[in-house]
Amino acid sequence: MRRLSLVILAAAATLTLASCSASGGGGDAPEEGGAVTDLQIIVPAEPGGGWDQTGRSIAQLLTAEDIVDSAPVTNIGGAGGTVGLASLANEKDPHTVMVTGLVMVGAVETNAAQNRMEDTTPIARLTEEPLVVVVPAESEYDTLEDLVDDIVENGQDVSITGGSAGGADHILAGLLLEEAGLSGSEISESLNYIPNSGGGEAVALILGNNASAGISGIGEFLEHIDAGTMKALAVSSAEPAENLPDVETITEAGYDVVLTNWRGLLAPTGISDTDRDALIDVVTELHDSDAWTEELATRGWTDAFLTGDEFADYLDGNITEVTTTLQNIGLVE
């Protein structure tokens, strides 16, 4: 009877393996074109920054609203998100998304990254957020003009910290100096920019008085501004920000610069249209929920929802615009 039992078990195992092979995957791989029940989220930055806040907000709300069963977040930081982008390029699970945004557009160019955003599958643009220029609370700078004039006069003696090299924060710093009358080579010689792979690092530099000023999304600095440990000099939106209504815009400060930092989601290269549409459906359900609307208000994020082909077209145009800007301010050739 023992030999017979072993034969039956072996036959059952063979049938199980054959069934897995016929279905096109192993035990945990999602079925081709199946509904998204478990979503993997890649945050291409260290904890504490805007991408991390976005990824974890998405994960928490997707599960809280029962849109998916699970949505674990993995942080893969480095090089302005291009390390995470390389990881996405090798991802085989079609039910995976990576947080992305304007920062990555610039970082791909400045790092001459082999993996490019154009090679991924665009899912959705979710939000946009103004940037804010801040200084330590005890700083001698009371206005944006004070800061910019000091950089023009003393160059590398004045440091600005923010996100990755070539990202939105770095671009804004360059644009301010361009508006102050410096050329591309003069900007690169004068601008002492300290890049970071996560927003938490920039916060530490500013609070520790190890940087003269900082630039990032409002959400990353807001609690410190409200607590009085940072002083906000200006925001980069066309109109005053809702969560910083008393802070002037960069345009009001005398510099003709408007720049908002968008964030969205990309999926791996070459997934099926069915899987792409399933991911778009998940994100659309999240976007349409009251919980997401409340999250936008809490975080100070502006709704900028685009999906699928419309987002892909926007992304192509944004890449062209950012590349031109980086060339104009001397960050890439």
Image (cartoon, helix red, strand yellow):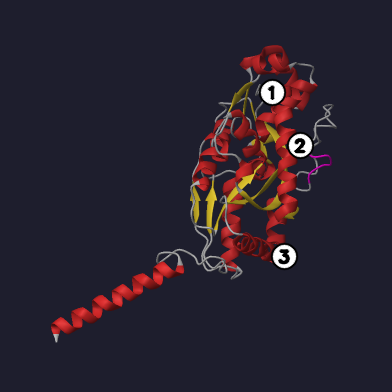
Q: Nearer the viewer, mark 2 or mark 1?
A: 2
The picture places residue 167, in percent across and down from the top left corner, at 64, 34
Q: Of residues 126 and 94, which is closer to you in this image?
A: 94
Q: To which residue does mark 3 refer?
A: 288
Q: Amino acid at mark 3?
A: Asp
Magenta stretch bounds: 232-241
Examine the image and state in which quarter residue 107 appears: top right
The Cα–Cα distance between marks 3 and 1, rounded to whole angstroms, is: 45 Å
Which residue is located at x 76 percent, y 21 percent?
178
Residue 72 vertical placement versus 23 (above, below): above
The Cα–Cα distance between marks 2 and 3, rounded to whole angstroms, is: 26 Å
The picture places residue 169, in percent across and down from the top left corner, at 66, 33
Disc 2 secondary structure class = loop
Q: To which residue does mark 2 refer?
A: 259
Name the dominant secondary structure of the magenta segment: loop
Disc 3 secondary structure class = loop
Residue 302 visible here: no
| Mark positioned earlier in the residue sequence (2 or 1) | 1
Q: Of residues 294 and 8, which is closer to you in this image?
A: 8
Numbered mark located on residue 266 in the image = none
Q: To which residue does mark 1 refer?
A: 140
Q: Amino acid at mark 1?
A: Glu
